[in-house]
Amino acid sequence: SRPMDWENVLNEIDSIIQPSRGQGRVADYIPALATVDPMKFGLAVALGDGNVHTLGDADEYFSIQSISKVFTLSMVLRKVGDELWESVGREPSGSPFNSIVQLELEGGIPRNPLINAGAIVVTDHLVQQQGADATIAELIERMRTLASDSAIHVDQAVAYSESEAGSRNRALAYFLKSFGNLRSPVEETLKAYFSHCAIAMNCRQLARAALFLAFDGTDPISGIQMVSSKACRRVNAVMMTCGHYDNSGDFTYRIGLPGKSGVGGGILVVAPGNGAIAVWSPGLNEAGTSEVGSLALETLVRQTGWSVFV
Ligand code: GLN
């Protein structure tokens, strides 16, 4: 097959998104997110040969927020394995990211690991094994190694604000605890959860760090096995069905690839066998997925033919 003409692909994306820049609503539950310029747009495509193609503000740091849930899920499948599925399900919720209602109806078992309740359970397993600080240290260390960039860090101001504004997540955690589905002290688990939501990365680093998900669980550049190939398929399946909360069906309809949104405006997408894509634009739709980011991904998939349904 002919090599992809990346310059052409990126030019096409640029011309499609320009008229829409600034669309959507910037998250405002914490000051650090509310003050981000809605006109920002960055995109990075990391390929298996180590090349990274970028567009716009691809080197600017943003708060990865719920995209971190993909990395904690990978970590827990590596360390705890299939036992995880006794404490969290794998069905789309059809509900907002921070919804609590299903928890009572379903015995304290969150629908999936990518909604807040499920991600808190995932983080809690890691915290039970090694405590909050070591969990975050290991997570950051892995991201830095995969992205070959030691500048990846937790934005402590964001982590602090997450906790200050964290009544809903605190309620979810205590509710889980009341059902016996939280193993560690609530505040210890939340400390780790708020910290991984507050990781600051740019599109280039994020696409590089997720490349293992496109290549059977092993990073093609460093050769590091992050997860087994079976666990890799599981993570991608859960991203495909649950990665965008009550917008998951529409995202899959439009883009046809496993993805995960964050309220910082980032979206991480996996193109199995091809590469990983990170896009960032702060304006969100009702479900908390970047509007311009989705538009860019739709264009990229059309240009590359990377949808899994092709
Ligand atoms: N930190 C946010 C929360 O826990 C993350 C939500 C998101 O990115 N969807 O509510």
Image (spheres, rainbow, N blue to C red):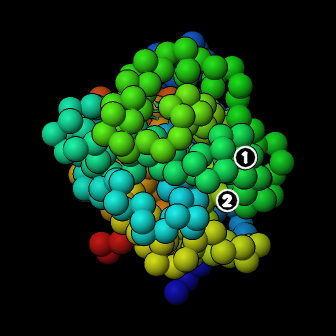
x and y percentages locating residue 297 in the rendered image? 44, 52
Could you say which quadrant of the image residue 173 lies in? Answer: top left
Q: Amino acid at mark 2?
A: Arg
Q: Amino acid at mark 1?
A: Ala
x and y percentages locating residue 143 in the rendered image? 71, 54
Residue that appears at 34% across and 53% down: 88
Query: Secondary structure beneath disc 1?
Result: helix
- Give above or below for 231 relative to 38: below
Residue that appears at 78% across and 59% down: 145
Q: Is residue 21 visible?
A: no
Q: Nearer the viewer, mark 1 or mark 2?
A: 1
User: Mark 1 and 2 residues: CB-CB less than 8 Å, in contact?
Assistant: no
Q: Which mark is residue 87?
A: none
- Give above or below for 112 relative to 188: below
Side of 20 where 77 appears, left or right: right
Q: Residue furthest left?
A: 105
Q: Nearer the viewer, residue 101 or 39?
A: 101
Tag 2 residue? 208
Dot placed on the residue nearer the N-terminal end, 1 or 2: 1
Category of crowding for the residue at label 2, using alpha-carbon neighbours closer than 10 angstroms: few (below 14), some (14–19), many (at least 20): many
Of the 4 image quadrants, the one containing the C terminus is: bottom left
Q: Residue furthest bottom?
A: 1
Q: Nearer the viewer, residue 145 or 289?
A: 145
Could you say which quadrant of the image residue 118 lies in? Answer: top left
> Disc 1 and disc 2: Cα gap in Å?
23 Å
Q: Nearer the viewer, residue 217 or 22?
A: 217
x and y percentages locating residue 6 in the rendered image? 60, 63
x and y percentages locating residue 112 in the rendered image? 33, 51
Q: Which mark is residue 134?
A: 1
Residue that appears at 83% across and 48% down: 150
Q: Nearer the viewer, residue 262 or 282?
A: 262
